[in-house]
Amino acid sequence: MYKILIVEDDPKIADLLKSHIEKYGDNGIVIHDFDHVLEQFEALEPHIVLLDINLPSFDGYYWCRQIRQISTCPIIFISARSGKMDQVMALENGADDFITKPFYYEIVMAKIRSQLRRVYGEFAAKHEERTVEKDGLVLYAERMELKLGAQTVALSKKEAILMETLLERSPRVVSREVILEKLWDDAFVDDNTLSVNITRVRKRLAELGIGDALETVRGLGYRLNATWKDLSLS
């Protein structure tokens, strides 16, 4: 399941976009706080962003530049401003595509799927692809996907980093300190934030039918046990 962030101040359009995205089995997330778009982007770690130009406080060009400073996540502008310079400015500020309003939702979905395939899926550059594998469980680091047999789940950036750290050291225990350094580069993070990320990884594993593989080792850290060995052969 891919996470698609919707930055659109027209609630009707935002809700309709969310509805169509979820029909395709992905997660549409609508932003309501337009003063802190970047903070929400960092917290949610979406796979793609749908971004309007005319927004309260700061316009879409501004937020596109801010996102581009920290991420190469695909960004598609959706706007009623259809002039050539609007499209040029969007692309110059880091957008990957531009859709003018009014639009057909089927076209929006086709463009979303195209960007997802290009960046995370079958059209992603294979020659640079880095994988981490253990007993049939494969992490595609750049695609941020985890695969077991014929099943695949999408990961957020932090989920992928955490999964890579655990896979590389499995079945050894990975200390909290190592995980914190990998995820937040020594920034202060409370125990609850780390626990939330561990829970998310457990959920991704559960989506592949893997239960109880990620073990909490009290006082030390976390260990990934290869409980999926038999599952990968089925």
Image (cartoon, rainbow, N blue to C red):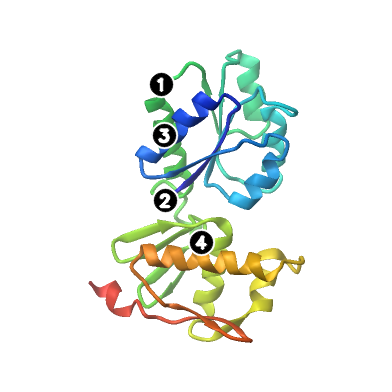
Residue drawn at x 41%, y 46% is: 123
How crowded pointer 1 is (Cα within 10 Å; few <14, some 14-19, many 20+) is rated as few
Instruction: Tell me the residue that label 2 is attached to.
Output: 1
Q: Is residue 78 above or below residue 213?
A: above
* Quadrant in which the C terminus appears: bottom left
Q: CA distance from mark 3 to mark 4?
A: 29 Å
Q: Which residue is mark 4?
A: 141
Callout 2–callout 1 Cβ contact below 8 Å:
no
Which one is in front in this view, the residue at disc 4 or the one at disc 2?
2
Using residue 180 as the reference point, say whether residue 207 is left or right of it.
left
Quarter of image, res 117: top left
The tag earlier along the polypeptide, 2 or 1, is: 2
Q: Which of the 4 quarters of the picture holds residue 33?
A: top right
Q: Position of residue 158 (x, y in %)?
A: 58, 61
Q: Earlier in the sequence, mark 3 or mark 4?
A: 3
User: 183 or 128, which lies in front?
Assistant: 183
Q: CA distance from mark 3 to mark 2?
A: 15 Å
Disc sitting over residue 104 in the figure: 1
